[in-house]
Image: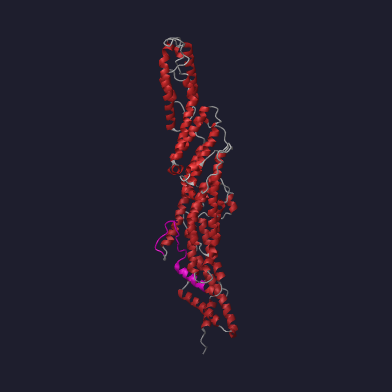
Amino acid sequence: MEPPESTASAAERIILRWDSTASEEAREKMIFTGDRHEIDRYLDAVDELQKSMSSATLSDSSSSAVASSTLQIAMARLEDEFRNILLLHTSPIEAESLTESTNSELTSQEFELKEEIEDRSFEKQFEHQESNSSTTSSCYKSTSSIREVDLIPSDAVYDLRCIAERMIAAGYLRECIQVYASVRKSAVDASLKKLNVEKLSIGDIQRLEWETLETKIRRWIRAAKICVRVLFASERRLCEQIFEGLGNSADDACFMETIKGPAIQLFNFAEAISISRRSPEKLFKILDLHDALSDLLPDIETVFESKSSESIRVQAVEILSRLAEAARGILSEFENAVLREPSKVPVPGGTIHPLTRYVMNYISLISDYKQTLIELIVSKPSTGPRYSSDPTVPDMDFSEFEGQASTLALHLIWIIVILQFNLDGKSKHYKDASLAHLFMMNNVHYIVQKIKGSPELREMIGDDYLRKLTGKFRLAATNYQRATWVRVLYCLRDEGLHVSGSFSSGVSKSALRERFKAFNAMFEEVHRTQATWLVPDTQLREELRISISEKLIPAYRSFLGRFRSHIESGRHPENYIKYSVEDLENAVLDFFEGYPVSQHLRRRSQ
């Protein structure tokens, strides 16, 4: 009768039966895809073998060598099983609308819509996964906070942990982590690809055109939220489920082995933007990036809380700091660009200069980001010394705003000051002083209207400074009227028309005729010229016409009433009294429309 088989021998027999190097059946079949009883038998056999090896004595050297060889076979088998379970339950997030083959055939609007649908579809996948999770009752609906999902079913997680326990106990921690990380990293890479996170170096990113980068920044912000709050957080949770408590911070090591490459790939994009060449058009996308990363930072610190993942936390904080510095630098460079904008060709008709539109639209956008910028902008504007002799920099004393305005507001006021300073320089390129004043009126009025049209901007600028600006465009309007109409109205004075010593009848008809001729010629020239000038704001244009009429029409009516009879009693009165009061009233309506009118005004009715 044969002696009973030892427990250790039975364990070795079970392990050797599944040696894939010695058996065709063992090569073709996987233990963990089969019967649960067989899985447990194999795991028990590994446990028994390890137990027998730990209790073996020095005299059992031959049996220890056999056991050691058998354990190596078992570890190789468990490694294959570990990899197979991961591969069976690891696949990129699938969504039918995340196909890229038709992107090149779409218009830009269709692509934007498709991209939005893809993002929603991607998030739906996570919502579906979490709703089916056995460990949570809430489903994933947004990326406003960390949402961990089950990346692998709980029964497969249990099997993976069973294998990991035995591999690590046998000293195969490194091999276990390498297998895990290689498979899971591929899954993370596939998910990043679905989110349009491309593998670009910092140099590649900096060589892209800004218009291309703007689209990529918008995509990156959405992708980063999902990556940090869902993908990376769920990968960390999976590592904890499989490796936590198995010694040597295995879960942390495994998580970093899996995530470090994709995380660096993700954050390199933001880093490249933060150190790229600065220019005004980049400010708002940089602020979008800053806000997104700032919002994500608490979650980054939670997901990457371990010592081994400190480098990721540090990188995120440094990028945030560089984005803040970039925003400050861009604002300073924008101020200098406004001050030095070199165009000298006058805009036709004295209308609003493109620089004015650009600057005011720009600072209106700045006001939309005021919460962020109030935190970032902590230094006052760099102005020239008060009463300096440098004629290229305006004087500005901020003491009157002390305690009333934020540092950001001071920068906005300074931008408006230097814009006006530049515009004043441009106005001097007009040969006609009246047009120079009209140009300043139009532009300062536009500045005032843009401030009034933005509650955020108006709040920061303040009503006191707004009143100063209103006073400036009204002063420019007054200066225009003086430059144009004082000389016209001068023709309608009484002085020089009366013959000395005879007030009642002593009017010099020749002087009167010359006076009417001078008025007609002067008004016709003003009408011809200023009809081509432009006041684009309807209300301002109407107010200016009314103001002109209030001065011109009563003066002409009075002059005509006093001296009409002296002209009409002579020869060819129509050569001198060419226009009725109504003719002038109608002519004023032609002013500031921006296009030429007939060479001659409509003659008065005979």
Instruction: Report if residue 396 lies within the magenta region.
Output: no
Q: Position of residue 203 (x, y in %)?
A: 60, 52
Name, please, the residue furthest toward the left.
137
Say left or right for 203 vs 590: right
Q: In the rendered image, is residue 596 in sight?
A: no
Comparing 573 with 239, the one in front is 573
Q: Is residue 397 above or below residue 268?
A: above
Comparing 275 with 606, the one in front is 275
Q: Quadrant of the C terminus?
A: top left
Instruction: Report if residue 146 lies within the magenta region.
Output: yes
Q: Position of residue 106 (x, y in %)?
A: 50, 47
Q: Position of residue 30 (x, y in %)?
A: 51, 71
Magenta residues span 136-165
| Coloring applied to the structure | secondary structure
- Magenta span: predominant SS is loop
Comparing 516 with 414, the one in front is 414
Comparing 303 with 371, the one in front is 371
Say left or right for 263 vs 583: right
